[in-house]
Image (tube, rainbow, N blue to C red):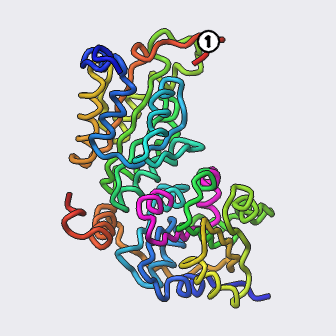
Amino acid sequence: MSRKANSPSARALDWPGELHRALRTHRVGQVSYVPDAGHKRLIELCHGDGEMAVVPLTTEEEGIGLAAGAWLGGKRAALLMQSSGVGNCVNAFTLACNCGFPLLMLVTMRGEWGEFNPWQVPMGQATPEILRLSGLRSLRLERAEDAYATAAAAAKLAFEGYASVALLISQRLIGTKAFGEKP
Amino acid sequence: MTPLHRRKVVRTLLARREGLLVVAGLGSPAWDCTDAGDHPLTFPLWGAMGLASMIGLGLALAQPKRRVLVVTGDGEMLMGLGSLATIGAQRPENLAIVVLDNERYGETGMQRTHTGYGVDLASAAKACGFAEARVVRRNAELEPMRSGVHRARGPLFFQVKVGAEVLPLALPPRDGSVLRHRFRETLLGKNVAGQ
């Protein structure tokens, strides 16, 4: 890698790489996900990371159970999903919040910035309020250069503050998908 | 054939724990595990229906040298049927799931579950890649099942057909923070659990 590519400014633009780096710094040992195009690179990085057990899910709420089991066993977990998956998790949040399990979710937003699919809009718009009503703390990631600091803050709040935390990754940052485009 | 008694099944399973880590699904399976003796390394659920097996998976991946047993009901397992596929993709060798199948939703008025309409959970688990998955109907099968939970290469799935009966409640602690903390403190020690 050239010196330029490895410089802090170049690294900051690779926000999925920065999210991965924050997960590593905070010793996340299990990563589960329902895929989203916005999470494509982070999922690949986690699969390539020998220190992370990576668990593809059939539905997002499975990841809340997995994270609870991981913590009972002394490991830290993170859960990746898109905003439509937040609705699938609502009753499962009671497990994390009621028992004081740390929960770290990285949520790629749909339905908020130039969305082309109307079916994504209601859930995307409702996501922040649903999380708040369910007892989760939300942090926003709007700019690539903030990726590491925001993810690290979310991880610290979850694992040291014993909180249920969602990092909401803005659709503007991910880039808006259109019909027929490859993710 | 006389149906198996669910509390006898669980007492047999938990008689000699040998360090077994247990997750108990909400409702009757949690009461059954408590009836067999409340234990800090049993995590009984009072909610989060459908997640018992996934908690077991997270625990099994985090503690590969320990054996993990999920004891749950047919209704709870049906709500998290996709987790059989998720577990099948991971194939943890130290995880066993025992479904106490009375073909009823026991806490809500004994309505028939899908297994009462003929749905075969053990075949679903087998199709998802469990190393062993079968239906258990006889007393003579209980001790071999217990032995398998401790020693056989998983993931294992036992669908135990039990009678539909209403039994006295045997309630575990209800405070989720207490359940979480006592489990971690016993498994990981005071220093780690407090961190």
Magenta stretch in the rendered image: B57-85
Q: Residue at x 46, y 52 (%)?
A: A66
Identify the residue shown where x is 67% and y is 77%. B164
Residue B106 is situated, as x and y percent measured from the top left of the image, at: 61, 69
Depth order, front residue of B90/A63? B90
**Location of residue B152 in the rendering, given as x and y in whole percent from the top left corner:** 60, 75
Query: Which residue matches tag 1?
Result: A181
Residue B79 visible within the image: no
Left or right of residue B148, residue A67 in this image:
left
Give the quarter of the figure containing the N terminus of chain B. Answer: bottom right
In the image, B42 versus A56, the foreground residue is A56
Q: Is residue A152 above or below residue A173?
A: below
Q: Is A111 inside the magenta-drawn segment?
A: no
Examine the image and state in which quarter residue A68 appears: bottom left
Label 1's element? loop
Give the percent coordinates (x, y) of residue B103.
70, 69
